[in-house]
Each structure stands twice: as C-alpha cells, then as structure tokens.
Image (tube, rainbow, N blue to C red):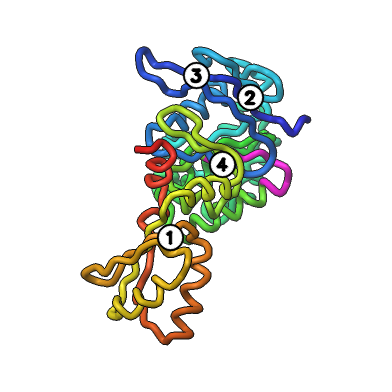
C-alpha cells in the first residue's frame, strides 16, 4: 500500500448556497494527523467526503487512488467514529461490537473472536458486558473506536473523539491513538481545541470557514502565530518590580501594569518562557500565575485571516 493514503484535490462541497468545504487540496499519510478548526469550519464535511458518505460538488477525493463515494473497495480500508453517538442503548458493549462485526460480513465465530480482540485493544474488556445505556462518555468513545477497528482498517477517522472526556480518559485515549499510529495506521482526528491537538500530534490541517488555512507540522502554525506580538498576563503582588526586570529583556516589546499584575507583549514567546523561570529564581520574584490569551485557536485564526 502507498503511504499516500488520502488525497484531496481542489475539493469542495456545497449544501445549496452554503459552503461546507471550499477548494481544499491536501494529503494524509501514516501516523496521527489532526484536522483542526472551530465548530462549523468544515471538519465533519471533510470526514464524510473521505469516508464516502458525500460526493464532492467539485474537485476530487481519493483514498488509495480510488474515489470513496459508494465504493465498497475503499470502505474495507476505513474505520470511522462519527461525532454523534448512535448506539443500541439496550445492548451491552460486547453485543454491540459483535452485532456490527456480523453486519461487516464476519461469521459467528470470527465475529465473537474479533469483537473480543478490539474490545481488549481499547481497554474495555472489564466493562463490555454492561449495557451501553449506563456507559460514561469515555466508555462510549472507546466502544465507538472498537467498532471502527473491526476490519483492521489502514485508515481510522475520528470526529471529535475527545469531547466530554475527563483528563485521565483523554490521556488514555490519546495514548491508544499513538499505539495505533505506531503500528502503521493512518489516524485522522478532528478537534476544535488546540491543546488537545498538541498532545496528539505535530501534523495538522487547519480549517477555517471551509478553507484550508495551513497544513504541516504544528511548528509552522506556531511560527505564523509568533510573527505577531504575543501577549502574556502575569498575576503578581510585585507588578512594578517584575515590570522593571522584564522591560530590560530585548525581546519584550512592552509591559503594562494591570489591576492584578501586568501584561506584556513579546515577538519571541519561546525565549520569554525560557527566561521567565530563571529570572524569577535569580531575583526572588513572586508570581501567582501566568498565561497567554493568545495561546488558543481563536487567536490563531484571528491572526491568520487578519480579523
């Protein structure tokens, strides 16, 4: 199989007068790739084009060189977890996965064996005999992933799989995705939360209003962001003392004292974040908290589209 598993060429999808995806060209290969964008950016539309649920209005979508729309040969290579749950709530997790295995064409014995294998792979063996109606969000996400893995697909597409997960469940789920990627799978994960993506992968596709704004290593997006002044807010009882130290740094553009501390601007946030703890220790300064209001997805979009 080629490493060029998914390819979109000037692909667009219209819903009447509404643009779902607009002239997108990109490729996706093995490993974890994040499809990053705000709600309504076109992530789910792109997923449905790749999985063959939709046909592109214009342009071309290929999976292993074949058009996926209504193509069973492509479906054999795909596993898909939609964002919206659609379970048979009265079934147990084991019965649900077994049932879908049978729908996939497995005979009884192989369906039971394969269901047990994928349930164990997603860490649900000890809970799979409970009814889905009583599952937590994290358990539901795991069972969805289990059914997506039934046919041992080369490509797994996950639409907002971390929604509603607590921090521990999120970490466990991300670790599972990494293990799948290390086995050679292509994992395409959609998300609208930047820090989630940073934990999953460095490879991203950045969508905004149906258009692909940027693609490649997350470092590229960070570099684009760092071309603009980066704000950092510091909570402290020593705002003037700390401001005096910070204005002496060549990469700090400005410092303004606020009600509960200070706010600064820098064009080199990485250097600043490296220097701040050293400065605090050397000068004996006291800082309660610091964060950046620009270190989020909304800010990236605002900078990249100049809004």
Q: Is label 4 in a helix, a strand or a loop?
A: strand
Residue at the disc numbered 2 = 75
Residue at the disc numbered 3 = 12
Of residues 61 and 168, which is closer to you in this image?
Answer: 61
Instruction: Reply above or below: 272 against 42.
Output: below
| Label 1 Cα crowd, 10 Å radius (few <14 / some 14-19 / many 20+) | many
Q: Are marks 3 and 4 in contact (CB under 8 Å)?
A: no
| Label 4 Cα crowd, 10 Å radius (few <14 / some 14-19 / many 20+) | many
In the rendered image, the quadrant that contains the C terminus is top left
Q: Is residue 126 left or right of residue 298?
A: right
Q: Earlier in the sequence, mark 3 or mark 1?
A: 3
Residue at the disc numbered 4 = 204
Magenta stretch in the rendered image: 181-189
Magenta stretch: residue 185 in it? yes
Q: Give x and y (percent) for residue 104.
A: 62, 27
Of tags 3 and 2, the one toward the viewer is: 3
Q: Is label 3 in a helix, a strand or a loop?
A: strand
Q: Earlier in the sequence, mark 2 or mark 4?
A: 2
Of tags 3 and 1, the one toward the viewer is: 1
Of residues 190 and 211, which is closer to you in this image?
Answer: 211
Magenta stretch: residue 98 in it? no
Q: Is residue 168 left or right of residue 8?
A: left
Q: Is residue 113 left or right of residue 126?
A: right
Q: Earlier in the sequence, mark 1 or mark 2?
A: 2
Q: Earlier in the sequence, mark 3 or mark 2?
A: 3
Of tags 2 and 4, the one toward the viewer is: 4
Q: Earlier in the sequence, mark 4 or mark 1?
A: 4
Q: Is label 1 in a helix, a strand or a loop?
A: strand
Check residue 266 in the rendering and tell me which mark sits there, or answer none: 1
Q: Give x and y (percent) for residue 153.
A: 67, 34
Of tags 4 and 1, the one toward the viewer is: 1
């Amino acid at each position: 199989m080629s490493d060029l598993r998914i390819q979109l060429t000037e692909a667009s999808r219209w819903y009447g007068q509404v643009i779902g995806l607009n002239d997108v060209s990109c490729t996706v290969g093995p490993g974890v790739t994040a499809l990053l964008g705000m709600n309504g950016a076109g992530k789910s539309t792109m997923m449905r084009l790749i999985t063959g649920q939709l046909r592109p209005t214009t342009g071309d979508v290929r999976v292993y060189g074949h058009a996926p729309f209504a193509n069973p040969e492509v479906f054999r290579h795909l596993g898909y977890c939609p964002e919206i749950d659609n379970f048979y709530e009265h079934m147990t997790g084991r019965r649900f996965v077994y049932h879908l295995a049978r729908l996939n064409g497995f005979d009884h014995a192989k369906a039971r064996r394969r269901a047990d294998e994928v349930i164990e792979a997603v860490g649900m063996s000890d809970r799979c005999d409970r009814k889905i109606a009583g599952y937590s969000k994290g358990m539901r996400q795991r069972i969805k992933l289990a059914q997506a893995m039934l046919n041992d697909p080369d490509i797994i597409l996950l639409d907002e799989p971390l929604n509603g997960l607590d921090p521990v469940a999120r970490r466990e789920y991300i670790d599972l995705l990494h293990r799948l990627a290390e086995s050679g799978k292509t994992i395409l994960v959609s998300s609208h939360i930047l820090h989630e993506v940073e934990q999953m992968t460095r490879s991203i596709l950045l969508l905004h209003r149906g258009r692909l704004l940027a693609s490649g290593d997350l470092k590229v997006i960070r570099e684009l962001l760092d071309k603009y002044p980066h704000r950092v807010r510091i909570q402290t009882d020593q705002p003037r003392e700390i401001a005096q130290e910070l204005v002496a740094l060549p990469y700090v553009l400005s410092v303004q004292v606020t009600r509960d501390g200070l706010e600064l601007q820098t064009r080199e946030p990485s250097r600043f974040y490296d220097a701040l703890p050293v400065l605090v220790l050397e000068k004996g300064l006291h800082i309660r908290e610091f964060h950046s209001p620009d270190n989020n997805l909304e800010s990236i979009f605002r900078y990249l589209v100049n809004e």
